[in-house]
Amino acid sequence: MKRSSVKAAAGRQEARQGWKAGGNPEKAFRNWVLFLLVAVVAAYANHFFNGFHFDDFHTIVNNAYIRSLRNIPRFFVDGTTFSSLPANQSYRPIVSTTLAIDYFLGHGSLFFFHLSTFLLFLFQGVVMYHLYLSIFDRSQRGAENSYVALIAVAWYLLHPANAETINYILARSDSLSTLFILLSFAVYIRWDFGRRRHLYLIPFALSCLAKPIGAIFAPLLLLYVYLFEETVGSRLRRLAASLKKSIPSFAACLLLLTFIKKMDPPTWRAGGGSLFHYVITQPYVLLQYFITFFAPLHLSADTDWRPLASVFDIRFLAGILFLVGLVAVACLSAKTMRLRPISFGLFWFLLTLLPTSLIPLAEVMNDHRLFLPYVGLVVSVCWAAYLLLEGAKSRIGSDTHFLRVTTTLILVALAACGYETHVRNAVWHSELSLWRDVTIKSPHNGRGLMNYGVALMDQGHYADAETYFHKAMKYVPRYAYLYVNLGIVEAKTGKLVEAQNDYQKAIMLDPNWPGGYYWYGDFLKKQKRYDDAIFYTKRALQMSPANLDARKLLMAIYLECGKLTDLKALAKQTLQIFPGDAQAEKSLAAAEEGIKRLQQ
């Protein structure tokens, strides 16, 4: 062990002794770790059977590719396997692979999807602790660094804003990407052989294959090297030396992004509108993200925020002032080694939010976008709080009294976070509970009003559902999904003419969405208009070959109208793509039996 490492370990031993005078310092620290583990498990104990939401439906529920482990090699060469919706198909093979494994282990059970995400979350906490401890030791050896690192991890794991990423199954793209970025740092910082052989680039590559945001590792590594490794010489010389060390990561970043761009299906769409209006909104969004870290009181799964109309909006000015102030604090903190964890965390927060601030997405803000940025922000806040408490400690007469007050405040804060996380988990339990919460916190969100109506419709409350659909129309009058759902509820209540008109309007508004054709085909089948039903269902299937629902609907239509040859061909094709599908096997048997009878 290096001499500096021995000093750091000795400092931590003294600190642990200070946190529990007269006791076993190692045992005291283990008790804190155990307390953290129990607290996190208790906070998330009610989430393991929560339902599917948002993009889970087209990437898991209706995506037949994840139902067989034999498709795993295909995930790495075909981005269309990620989703059954063309506009949402992107190259994320690591995510699809983990989903296929979970589906295999649990036969589609929700529990295994949530369990694997949660276990990865706990493992991320372990990696975060070692990263934080390394950063704190480089800045100021000794003191209570191990406890500060542990408290930072506890705050992050229990933070209510992270509950969205853990409950929303497809958001594991964020958790996987974050975990692999942290593993890259762990290999680089704590394993000399891994650094010399550039093995830290392996988890970096996996991060990018889970979500392209993983490419942010390269500038983060440059930041780390500049602040904590290249500490001698002028700023320009330090920057040049840092860039030299970071060249492999930037080269890998360029190659990975080029490869991913090539592998992304051409049908993928970001879903955003005006780039200008989206970008001028982001400074104020970042301010809200910062406030949410300290006061996560109005979390919403789908906010009703809209892009700002002009730079003369007072919110744009507030956001710009916040950004300038945050950058100024980060730059000033970088001048002193003792304050550099604050600088590192603030720059981490800003850098990791940069991609989603410059690419116009469908929503201007989302809670799951905070999963990676909060890894850095919690470093800044906890280290700054520790330095302030360290300064105040000398003004308090009794070390024991100071320790008791500090410990009490920490426990109260962590308990409050854990309770709020538990409450957020309950909100994510079902579509009904989730979208009801959205309508309360984001009452001007047309999609939220519509989805709450869909949840009510699934419960058989058709009149209430139709009321919410009409409320939603005020905010999203050209939303194809809304007209399809309005058509469904009208068909269930006997308004067949109105239903047909709404289905047709949905197709007109979004001719590239296969869902409009599918639901209209289902409506036509129930009206026994088989030729039209076949035409529209085929359109849906052509646009989304992985959609098993469309295949099953078309097989059912063929069976009802006696097109046995077509049924046999479709069933065989389905079994070639998705071997073992029960309905395809039954349809094939029915077609062969029917053809045999006709021949006889």
Image (cartoon, rainbow, N blue to C red):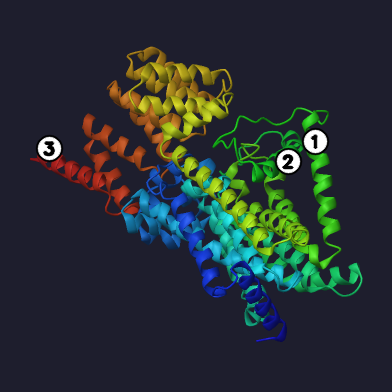
Q: Nearer the viewer, mark 1 or mark 3?
A: 1
Residue 5 in which image quadrant: bottom right
Real-space CA distance between mark 2 and mark 3, rounded to the nearest whole angstrom: 71 Å
Q: Earlier in the sequence, mark 2 or mark 3?
A: 2
Q: Name the residue under label 1.
A: 318
Side of 490 where 185 appears, left or right: right
Give coordinates of residue 585: x percent, y percent.
22, 48
Real-space CA distance between mark 1 and mark 3, rounded to the nearest whole angstrom: 76 Å
Q: Can residue 91 be seen in this view?
A: no
Mark 2 touching mark 1, by CB under 8 A?
A: yes
Q: Which quadrant does the N terminus fall into?
A: bottom right
Q: Is mark 3 on a helix, strand or loop?
A: helix
Q: Mark 3 points at which residue?
A: 598
Real-space CA distance between mark 2 and mark 1, rounded to the nearest whole angstrom: 8 Å
Q: Earlier in the sequence, mark 1 or mark 3?
A: 1
Between residue 327 and residue 500, name the one nearer to us: 327
Side of 534 where 27 appears, left or right: right
Q: Residue at x 65, y 63 (%)?
A: 400
Badge 3 crowding class, 10 Å Cα cut-off, few under 14, some 14 to 19, many 20 or more, is few
Judge whether 23 appears above or below 582 on screen.
below
Amino acid tagged 3: Leu
Between residue 298 and residue 113, name the one nearer to us: 298
Q: What element carries label 2?
A: helix
Q: Is mark 1 on a helix, strand or loop?
A: helix
Give coordinates of residue 356: x percent, y percent.
67, 46
Amino acid tagged 1: Ala
* Marking on residue 287: 2
Judge whether 408 appears above or below 240 on screen.
above
Residue 203 in which image quadrant: bottom right
Q: Which of marks 2 and 1 is nearer the N terminus?
A: 2
* Marking on residue 480: none
